[in-house]
Image (cartoon, grey):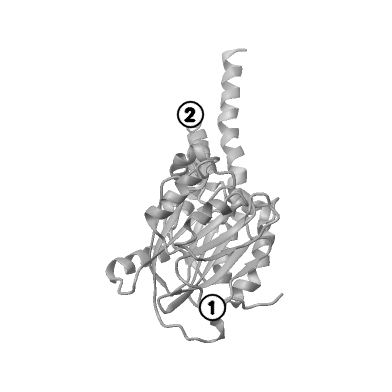
Amino acid sequence: MTNNHKHSWLTLAAVLVPILFSVPLVLGFFGTVHPVFDAFAHFRMHLAVLMAVSAIPALFLGLWREGLMAIVLALTALATVLVPTPYAEAEVAAQSTEPIVQPEYKLMQLNLRHDNARPADVIRLIAQEAPDVITLQEASASWRPKLKAIEARYPYNLYCPSTKHIGGVAILSRRPFALGSTPQCIGNSLVGLARIDFGGRSAIIAALHLEWPWPFEQADNVEQMRPYFERLHGPMIIAGDFNAVPWSQTLKNITEVSKTRSAEGLRPSWFINGTLAHAAAWVGLPIDHILVSERITGTRVETLEPAGSDHLPLLLHFSISGVDDGGPDQQTVMLSR
């Protein structure tokens, strides 16, 4: 192969590789058109970094225009992920200037992983953090006897049955369910709902576990939940494994229908398996989320150490403002289907 021929192949590769990364990157911005495009959006951060890096050889080969255009496009896409929204900045500023006068509570969110080889780490973490409420996913049959070790401290619980071998969602609480309310499971352990009494102020706690994006049933899951969240009112916290990133159409649809916002922003939480869980905080996908309604205040989220799962635990600190109105919308079961 002559030097000229080799140079031609290198030049072609330097142009084509960034273009190949740009196709799914750009398609990911059209999630409103079809769920297939929203599936691409989940890897926007990784695709943008790969595109920028792959464009560097073009600069060394003298293709300045092509290389710079690819890098600018990649950085523009990356900015939609990393730059905080004005709403988020205003929320942080408001919390820093207004002291919390209400009691503070804690909620722990964790996908247990159905075959977690280190269940003792989970129990130890719960004992260490002592959250008021715990939302769990993949609470398989093998987890039930292990969780009995903490039932004395968390006597109020909801386990949603599932036909999947990985198990369903669960809510464990040290605080009682609100008087007159009934915990509820939606779908095949898609969501568990419980209204919990926090010292006279109640809040709906939702433990959620969505399917993976297209071609799986994530979009159908959102539509299945829609009528429930449309009818629920009052303070609400939705925590779970969404299998969807913060900038996805899936998250936008859920926040809109539930009238909630993200309490934690960009927080990578999942990476392949429990062995590599420490890497999740740096290169993982941010698919575990905590959404809160307007009466949930003073929110602060911590990412905790791995506990044998491929998902990192999240700990939400929060308060509840306002006064319960005692009306019918205080019930958890709002819709009969």
Residue carrying label 2: 62
Percent across and percent down for residue 165 are 67, 49
The vertical placement of 323 against 176, above or below, is below
Percent across and percent down for residue 327 are 53, 87
Percent across and percent down for residue 56 are 47, 32
The residue lying toward the viewer, choosing from 234 and 65, is 234
Residue type, numbered disc 2: Gly
Percent across and percent down for residue 112 are 54, 50
* Residue 52 visible to an observer of this rendering: no
Q: Name the quarter where the N terminus is drawn.
A: top right
Residue type, numbered disc 1: His
Q: Name the quarter where the C terminus is drawn.
A: bottom right
Residues packed near mark 1 inside 10 Å, few (<14), some (14 to 19) or many (20 plus): some
On screen, residue 257 versus residue 291, left or right, reads: right
Please name the residue shown 49% across and 54% down the image. 149
Please name the residue shown 50% across and 58% down the image. 289
The residue lying toward the viewer, choosing from 312 and 217, is 312
The residue lying toward the viewer, choosing from 54 and 243, is 243
Between discs 2 and 1, the one toward the N terminus: 2
The vertical placement of 222 against 271, above or below, is below
The residue lying toward the viewer, choosing from 76 and 252, is 252
Q: Which mark is residue 175?
A: none
Residue carrying label 1: 233
